[in-house]
């Protein structure tokens, strides 16, 4: 019996709790807080689900990670695979990607409108083996669809990141990692809902001030600016919304209350 | 010189039936209807199938008589052009085993044998090879040898299969033929019968000089060529550079799944064509024809199917065609399909990592062609920097196919290789010298809205302002630029905007701007 156990252990068919860090191969996410809570970083392979509203920094959370993946590929094979964006909510700006040092030659954008087309494209890209990451904006996901994506990601050694709006119909999707993001003045509040080879942990804050000083505030700033209304923009009143094309000179203006 | 003439008396019929037999292989052969091909000009049957012969139909019968003999008669018009195109297909296939092929349209081929005997040693081997090539077409054919192409033709067209290198054997076989078999004008034949010449042997017995006074020059010319005294100038088959094939469907097809079968047949022919030449092709054109008023085949639609990587395998092309057809709606049942390829590329092989191999199943170009064919050209995009400081012009999308592939495809393989190396090196350098120039770029939102939206909620400003104004040299050219470069953005007019980075109540980082008249808009999101 003991001999058999040993043999099985040798073949790597038995998983022991001590090996927890080896279950998922991870790579530095670029944010120390994230690395700490996710056993060293984000997974190199598999499906990552992100529940977030658009425009709070969800892409910025993954940009250093994608860049790290890219560098790891370059160091290994002297050539890189593609990064694919499928059905982004608006036009993606090339300047933003260049700022994050992601080369445009390695970028493919698929602007499909139908969810089934997006899923099909994602699966094809993943399993082709010539894309290292596929970013997909998709609301509805079924268990079997995620399983297929996961299978495809394993085949092509790629990672699939799916952005969904928060509180989506919460089935137990077979994803490798599930994160829920919330906006914070300093960056993002990350809530790990599920991770492969680990436990869901308490929500923590990721500080993005170092990478993106203009988009975030430091903790000190928050305290100082709290309650100060100096930079609040009052939007157009609802009556004006419909007349904003031809405003009269004396109409009630909206604007910055100069401090 | 020894020639082998192959006559296909029912070429059009056989080709149509071969296509059908493949599809209905399981069903009984004897259930085939009587099929006749009628020459519309002479109103007589030119070709007929076995079941038609069984029902007492004969060649040369009038259509009315045939119709009165058989109640379920399938009639097709004789089409010489079609038959000639079938003949070209045969010549193309035969070209792989024999060198000189003289075309005798509409349904005959003459092959020069004696050169080929050096390769094949025996006539039987040579004939067996040729029969092997012709076997898949299931044609009825007469083979005959002769020491001039015309004598071989004479024998084959008379329905005599004679395979021999023996001169005397051939001569006696020809001698017994009646003069009606000769390919000469009716007037000349009449002249001969008046002279009492009935067989070819009688004709041979006469002196040439004597005959010349009675017969016209054309006939004398023909006879000289027949006896190999004068060599006939022949049209020899030259392999074509472009590929063009078509399949005529026996019945109308309106289901795409069924349509794939004849397409597969065409693609297999293409594969053989490409493989023989060691070529790849990047684009194929599939034309679908349907029945229209007066015409049995009128073009319904032409589909261009492109592959980013050169392909020759029928399997890959079929996959792409299948994807393309899913987005195609057939307007009417299809009666004919044609496939044409105009440009080819030398097969250079792909450079893969010897140690890692190919990880996935496809190369990037293959993946891109999959996506483009399924989703459409306008949905698979690359990104490019624009030379403008305004955010909406600073980056734009370009269709993938027009952007990279076509230009890459033209470049020679060596250049591609060096380019790949260079770009890899450059990229590595660029990536390692991190943030060298990226820091100098202005901060721009990741998502740019196609049209700025009016700001409708409270936001708090975090950063700004940054004034962006249309450049003076653009103010006049704005309209022009719009049409030429980026037609998707319709905001070409002059503007002056003060941009701010602001956060709204949900914590979204917005890129808002104020126009001169103090109106606020959202232009993008930093995500």
Image (tube, grey):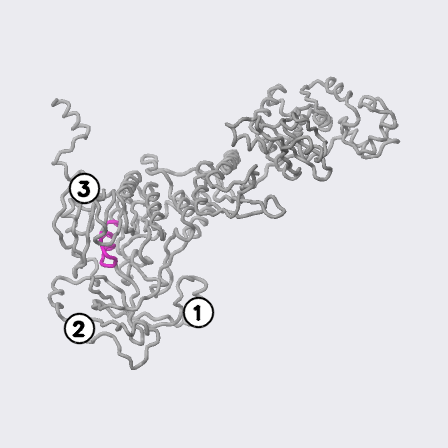
Q: Chain of mark 2?
A: A
SS for dot 1: helix
Q: Is residue B101 left or right of residue B494?
A: right
Answer with the quarter of the image where residue B350 lies: top left
Instruction: Measure how far apart labels 2 and 3 are at the Cα level.
Output: 45 Å
Instruction: Measure how far apart labels 3 and 1 are at the Cα level.
Output: 56 Å
Residue shown at 32%/62% (left/top)? B449
The tag on residue B409 is: none
Label 2 sits on residue: A230
The tag on residue B477 is: 1
The tag on residue A196 is: 3
Instruction: Measure how far apart labels 1 and 2 are at the Cα level.
Output: 40 Å
B144 shown above or below B442: above
Answer with the quarter of the image where residue B96 lies: top right
SS for dot 3: loop
In front of the other: B40 or B235: B40
Answer yes or no: are tags 2 and 3 on the same subunit: yes
Q: Which residues are magenta?
A: A51-67
Q: In the image, residue B241 lies at what x, y percent?
A: 57, 40
Answer yes or no: are tags 3 and 1 on the same subunit: no
Which dot, 3 or 1, sits closer to the camera?
3
| Mark 1 and mark 2 residues within 8 Å of each other at the beta carbon | no
Q: In the image, residue B444 lies at what x, y percent?
A: 29, 62
């Amino acid at each position: 019996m003991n001999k058999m156990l040993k043999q099985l252990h040798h073949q790597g068919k038995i998983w022991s709790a001590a090996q927890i860090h080896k279950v998922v191969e991870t790579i530095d996410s670029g944010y120390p807080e994230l690395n700490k809570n996710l056993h060293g970083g984000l997974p190199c392979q598999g499906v990552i689900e992100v529940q977030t509203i658009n425009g709070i920094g969800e892409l910025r959370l993954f940009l250093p990670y994608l860049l790290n993946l890219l560098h790891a590929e370059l160091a290994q094979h002297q050539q890189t695979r593609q990064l694919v964006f499928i059905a982004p909510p608006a036009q993606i700006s090339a300047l933003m990607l260049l700022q994050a040092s992601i080369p445009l030659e390695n970028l493919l954008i698929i602007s499909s409108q139908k969810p089934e087309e997006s899923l099909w494209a994602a699966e094809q890209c993943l399993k082709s083996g010539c894309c290292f990451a596929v970013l997909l904006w998709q609301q509805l996901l079924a268990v079997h669809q995620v399983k297929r994506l996961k299978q495809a990601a394993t085949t092509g050694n790629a990672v699939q990141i799916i952005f969904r709006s928060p509180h989506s119909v919460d089935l137990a999707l077979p994803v490798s990692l599930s994160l829920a993001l919330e906006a914070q003045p300093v960056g993002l509040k990350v809530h790990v809902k599920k991770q492969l080879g680990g436990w869901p942990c308490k929500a923590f804050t990721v500080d993005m001030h170092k990478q993106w000083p203009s988009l975030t505030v430091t903790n000190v700033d928050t305290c100082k600016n709290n309650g100060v209304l100096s930079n609040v923009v009052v939007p157009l009143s609802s009556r004006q919304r419909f007349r904003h094309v031809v405003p009269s000179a004396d109409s009630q203006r909206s604007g910055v209350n100069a401090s | 010189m020894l020639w082998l003439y192959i006559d296909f008396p029912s070429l059009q019929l056989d080709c149509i039936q071969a296509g059908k037999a493949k599809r209905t292989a399981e069903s009984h052969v004897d259930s085939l209807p009587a099929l006749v091909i009628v020459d519309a000009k002479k109103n007589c049957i030119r070709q007929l199938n076995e079941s038609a012969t069984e029902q007492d139909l004969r060649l040369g019968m009038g259509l009315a008589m045939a119709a009165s003999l058989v109640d379920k008669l399938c009639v097709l018009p004789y089409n010489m052009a079609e038959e000639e195109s079938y003949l070209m297909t045969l010549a193309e296939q035969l070209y792989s085993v024999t060198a000189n092929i003289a075309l005798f349209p509409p349904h005959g081929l003459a092959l020069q044998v004696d050169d080929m005997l050096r390769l094949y040693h025996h006539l039987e081997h040579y004939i067996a090879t040729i029969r092997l090539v012709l076997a898949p077409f299931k044609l009825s054919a007469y083979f005959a040898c002769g020491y001039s192409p015309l004598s071989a033709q004479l024998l084959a067209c008379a329905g005599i299969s004679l395979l021999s290198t023996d001169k005397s054997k051939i001569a006696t076989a020809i001698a017994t033929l009646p003069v009606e078999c000769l390919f000469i004008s009716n007037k000349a034949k009449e002249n001969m019968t008046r002279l009492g010449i009935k067989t070819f042997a009688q004709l041979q017995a006469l002196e040439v000089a004597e005959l010349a006074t009675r017969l016209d020059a054309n006939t004398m010319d023909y006879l000289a060529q027949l006896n190999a005294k004068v060599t006939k100038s022949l049209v020899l088959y030259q392999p074509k550079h472009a590929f063009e094939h078509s399949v005529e469907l026996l019945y109308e097809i309106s289901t795409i799944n069924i349509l794939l079968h004849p397409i597969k047949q065409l693609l297999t022919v293409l594969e053989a064509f490409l493989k023989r030449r060691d070529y790849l092709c990047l684009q194929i054109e599939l034309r679908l024809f349907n029945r229209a008023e007066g015409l049995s085949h009128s073009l319904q639609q032409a589909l261009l199917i492109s592959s980013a990587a050169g392909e020759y395998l029928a399997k890959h092309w079929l996959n792409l065609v299948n994807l393309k057809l899913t987005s195609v709606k057939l307007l009417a049942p299809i009666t004919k399909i044609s496939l044409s390829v105009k440009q080819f590329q030398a097969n250079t092989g792909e450079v893969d990592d010897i140690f890692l191999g190919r990880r996935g199943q496809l190369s990037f170009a293959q993946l891109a062609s999959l996506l483009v064919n399924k989703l459409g050209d306008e949905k698979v995009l690359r990104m490019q920097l624009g030379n403008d400081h305004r955010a909406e012009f600073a980056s734009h999308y370009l269709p993938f196919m027009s952007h990279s592939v076509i230009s890459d495809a033209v470049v020679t393989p060596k250049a591609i290789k060096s380019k790949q190396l260079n770009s890899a090196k450059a990229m590595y350098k660029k990536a390692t010298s991190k943030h060298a120039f990226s820091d100098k770029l202005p901060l721009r939102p990741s998502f740019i809205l196609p049209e700025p939206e009016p700001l409708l909620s409270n936001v708090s400003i975090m950063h700004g302002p940054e004034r962006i104004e249309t450049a003076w040299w653009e103010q006049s050219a704005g309209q022009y630029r719009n049409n030429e470069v980026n037609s998707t953005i319709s905001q070409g007019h002059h503007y002056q905007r003060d941009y701010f980075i602001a956060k709204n109540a949900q914590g979204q980082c917005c890129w808002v701007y104020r126009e001169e008249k103090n109106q606020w808009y959202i232009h993008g999101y930093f995500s």
